[in-house]
Image: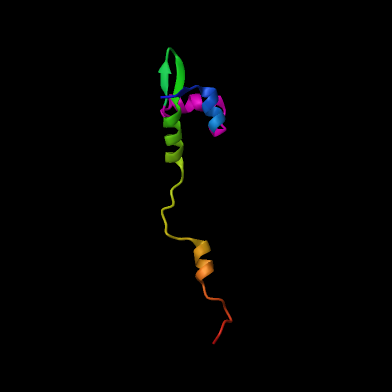
Amino acid sequence: MNLIDVKKVSEMISVKPSTIYQWAELGQIPCVKLSGSLRFDSEDISKWIDDCKKQLHSGYNPLAQTLTRPKKGGKK
């Protein structure tokens, strides 16, 4: 377990430290409170970031369709 502080987390994800404190208070980010100070497991934060990524739920790929679509005015 590698514990890091609020400043390091805020730098990792490019948000203000006050945002990190707010997310922690709301239970939106995994954290540990030790002697009144918030600490974060760097592995938990990496997993949390991965879990926040938007997932592709559709098989739709516009690039693939433009590559496979027959050209207009082709051979007859």
Name which residue lies at 51% across and 23% down: 6
Name which residue lies at 41% across and 53% down: 57
The span shown in magenta is 13-30
- In the figure, 27 relative to 50: above or below? above
Q: Position of residue 23 (x, y in %)?
A: 47, 28
- The quadrant holding residue 30 is top left
Q: Is residue 49 left or right of residue 14?
A: left
Q: Magenta segment: does it hold 24?
A: yes
- In the figure, 51 relative to 21: above or below? below
Q: Position of residue 74 (x, y in %)?
A: 57, 82
Outermost residue on the top side: it is 35
Outermost residue on the front side: it is 1
Name which residue lies at 50% across and 70% down: 68
**Rendered-image quadrant of the N terminus:** top left
Colour theme: rainbow
- In the figure, 1 relative to 70: above or below? above
Q: Position of residue 31 (x, y in %)?
A: 42, 25
Q: Magenta segment: does it hold 75?
A: no
Q: Nearer the viewer, residue 43 or 9?
A: 43
